[in-house]
Image (cartoon, helix red, strand yellow):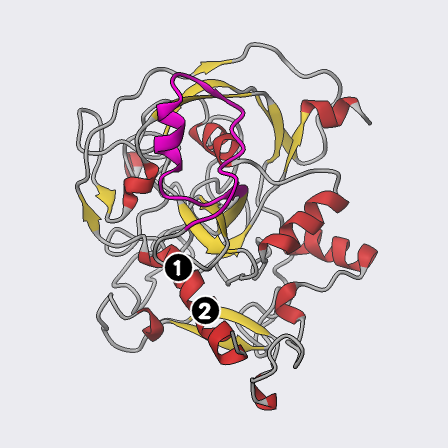
């Protein structure tokens, strides 16, 4: 693949996450059973900035069109069937990793993110020299209404876009130390987690944590999008992709802890920015787990990645939705729904948080 192809591939790979978040459509029924949380409590002091997730057995996936269920985004069959899963207890970052935390990591290690690395002639021998530029994919609102099947209207590859300049060289993160770090590719997130003595969550761990002890609810806080008229997550208001009206207080990304936590004390576990999980992405993975019978234990995801839309791209799971999610085009703030992304691609609406196993604590 030449660099032009890479830029196109990166753009398409990121947009694939958004394309799977189209207007709602029906696709079946599902049944939820109560979450059976573990009663055991961890020993020792809580790691700084982390909360205890007890683990246990729960119903994983997204309900659609049954009693107590909801309409789902088109293309959401990868979130079904609902199936029982067991996860051990673990610690999880209360917030998405912030710019300040990531800068501390970079200062300590000298790490250079993938978006900062200039492609070489060795990697792309047929690419013109002028196309060998570091950068990443950036969302920009349009100045007029556009068809929602033309994602190139709002996504583009921007030279010089990386975590310090998430929208390109003209942008910066000054005064935004407490905002989620974005433009993070999967290897960047893994590198940070290793440095911090943590790891990325599995998809099952993420969903158990996101549900906060609830079962079968539409959102991580319950079944009403705005209970009592209160905004519960950073999402998009207004005509997409024309303008985010910012009715929830933020037009675009928000500082961490701007919205109420879920039942386990996790902030922005829905909305604000997408988050990497460690699982490879396959749309049929839930069918595979369900076929194995009751209670898959600590599932780690499939052995390899496969996305029928882009069979040559290696993708990992995204979870949680972002500030771009909306009822017109994306509703992946609905708990149980899934996203996906090419591993070497970051965007200005993609970050991460880390977890730590109880066994990792015991080895300290």
What's the distance in space between the residues labelled 1 and 2, CA to CA?
9 Å
The region drawn magenta spans: 278-306
Above or below, 170 against 95 in this view is below
Q: In the image, residue 131 lies at what x, y percent?
A: 56, 85
- Position of residue 256 in the picture relative to residue 29 (left or right): right
Q: Earlier in the sequence, mark 1 or mark 2?
A: 2
| Quarter of the C terminus within the rendering | top right
Task: Label 1: state its secondary structure.
Answer: loop
- Position of residue 216 in the picture relative to residue 175 (left or right): left
- Asked whether residue 4 appears in the rendered view, the answer is yes
Name of the residue lying farthest toward the top: 39
Indicate whether residue 27 is drawn in magenta.
Answer: no
The residue pinned by badge 2 equals: 9
Indicate whether residue 294 is drawn in magenta.
Answer: yes
Q: Are marks 1 and 2 in contact (CB under 8 Å)?
A: yes
Q: Residue at x 43, y 49 (%)?
A: 306
351 and 61: which one is in front? 61
Residue 310: give its label.
1
């Amino acid at each position: 693949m030449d660099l032009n192809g890479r830029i196109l591939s990166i753009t398409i790979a990121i947009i694939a996450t958004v394309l799977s978040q189209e207007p709602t459509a029906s696709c079946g029924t599902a049944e939820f059973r109560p979450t059976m949380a573990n009663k055991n409590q961890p020993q020792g002091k809580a790691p700084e900035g982390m909360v205890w997730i007890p683990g246990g057995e729960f119903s994983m996936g997204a309900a659609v069109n049954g009693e107590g269920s909801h309409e789902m985004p088109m293309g959401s069959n990868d979130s079904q069937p609902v199936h029982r899963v067991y996860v051990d207890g673990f610690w999880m970052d209360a917030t998405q990793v912030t710019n300040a935390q990531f800068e501390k990591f970079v200062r300590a290690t000298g790490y250079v993110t993938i978006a900062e690395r200039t492609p070489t002639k060795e990697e792309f021998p047929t690419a013109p020299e002028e196309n060998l530029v570091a950068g990443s994919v950036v969302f920009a609102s349009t100045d007029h209404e556009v068809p929602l099947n033309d994602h190139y209207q709002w996504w583009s590859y921007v030279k010089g876009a990386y975590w310090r300049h998430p929208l390109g060289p003209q942008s910066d993160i000054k005064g935004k130390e407490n905002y989620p770090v974005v433009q993070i590719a999967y290897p960047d997130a893994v590198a940070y987690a290793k440095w911090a003595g943590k790891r990325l969550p599995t998809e099952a761990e993420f969903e158990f944590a996101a549900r906060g002890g609830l079962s079968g609810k539409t959102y991580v806080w319950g079944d009403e999008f705005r209970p009592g008229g209160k905004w519960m997550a950073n999402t998009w208001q207004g005509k997409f992709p024309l303008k985010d009206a910012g009715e929830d207080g933020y037009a675009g990304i928000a500082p961490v802890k701007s919205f109420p936590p879920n039942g386990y004390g996790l902030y922005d576990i829905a909305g604000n920015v997408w988050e990497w999980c460690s699982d490879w992405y396959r749309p049929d993975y839930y069918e595979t787990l369900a076929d194995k019978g009751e209670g898959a234990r600590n599932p780690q995801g499939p052995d390899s990645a496969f996305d029928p839309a882009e069979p040559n791209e290696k993708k990992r799971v995204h979870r949680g939705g972002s500030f771009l999610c909306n009822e017109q085009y994306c509703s992946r703030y609905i708990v149980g729904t899934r996203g996906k992304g090419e591993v070497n691609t970051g965007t200005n609406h993609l970050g991460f948080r880390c977890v730590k196993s109880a066994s990792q604590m015991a080895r300290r």
